[in-house]
Amino acid sequence: MEIIILISLVVLLVLGALFVIPRSISKGKGKEAHSGGNGTTSRSYSKKDVSTHSTRMDCWIIIKDKVYDVTPYVEEHPGGDAILNNAGADSTEGFFGPQHGTRVFDIIDDFCIGELKD
């Protein structure tokens, strides 16, 4: 019974973190890469470019052919180091996994810095 209570508390803490993490941390990140406020990006990066940003202190990921600099979010990621599993590479599959709530889809746009080159 105590284990169930402990697990429930941990789950609640993790879910609570999704709502407590201030969006202001990521506000403004990547805005220089956006053009005209219409959601399109003006910078393009190759997979090789992205692959050089694969550490905790410099973490870029690719999601659906868009490039995101998630470095400011790494330490606050509710899933811990799971965000680093595909650092410097394509994270599309992991991003759309069942572990993410709908709030993540609102947050991610703040980190967009460009598009993936063909």
Image (cartoon, rainbow, N blue to C red):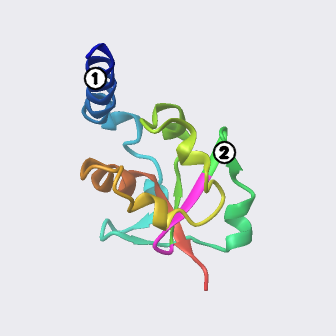
> In the rendered structure, which disc, 1 or 2, sits on the residue that comes first in sequence?
1
Q: Position of residue 79 (x, y in %)?
A: 46, 39
Given the current orientation, which residue lies at the most extreme front position?
A: 1
Question: Which type of secondary structure does the marked residue at label 1 adopt?
Answer: helix
Given the current orientation, which residue lies at the most extreme top position?
A: 2
Report the quarter where the N terminus lies: top left
User: Would you say residue 118 sits in the magenta stretch?
Assistant: no
Which residue is label 2 attached to?
A: 58
Specify few, some or many for label 1: CA neighbours under 10 Å numbering under 14, 14-19, or 20 or more: few
Label ID, residue 38 = none
In the visual, does 92 lie left or right of 84? left
The structure residue drawn at horizontal position 38% and vertical position 54%, both measured from the top left corner, is 108
The structure residue drawn at horizontal position 25% and vertical position 33%, both measured from the top left corner, is 19
Q: Nearer the viewer, mark 1 or mark 2?
A: 1
Residue 34 or 118: which is nearer the viewer? 118
Q: Position of residue 103 (x, y in %)?
A: 26, 48
The structure residue drawn at horizontal position 47% and vertical position 59%, both measured from the top left corner, is 94
Question: Which type of secondary structure does the marked residue at label 2 adopt?
Answer: strand
**Vertical order, 59 against 114 (above or below):** above
Which residues are the magenta region?
60-65
Q: Main secondary structure of the magenta part?
A: strand
Report the quarter where the C terminus lies: bottom right
Q: Position of residue 32 (x, y in %)?
A: 48, 57
Q: Position of residue 3 (x, y in %)?
A: 33, 19
Q: Amino acid at mark 1?
A: Ile
State which quadrant residue 16 falls in: top left
**Vertical order, 75 against 99 (above or below):** above
Q: Amino acid at mark 2?
A: Asp
Which residue is label 1 attached to?
A: 4
Residue 17 or 45: which is nearer the viewer? 17
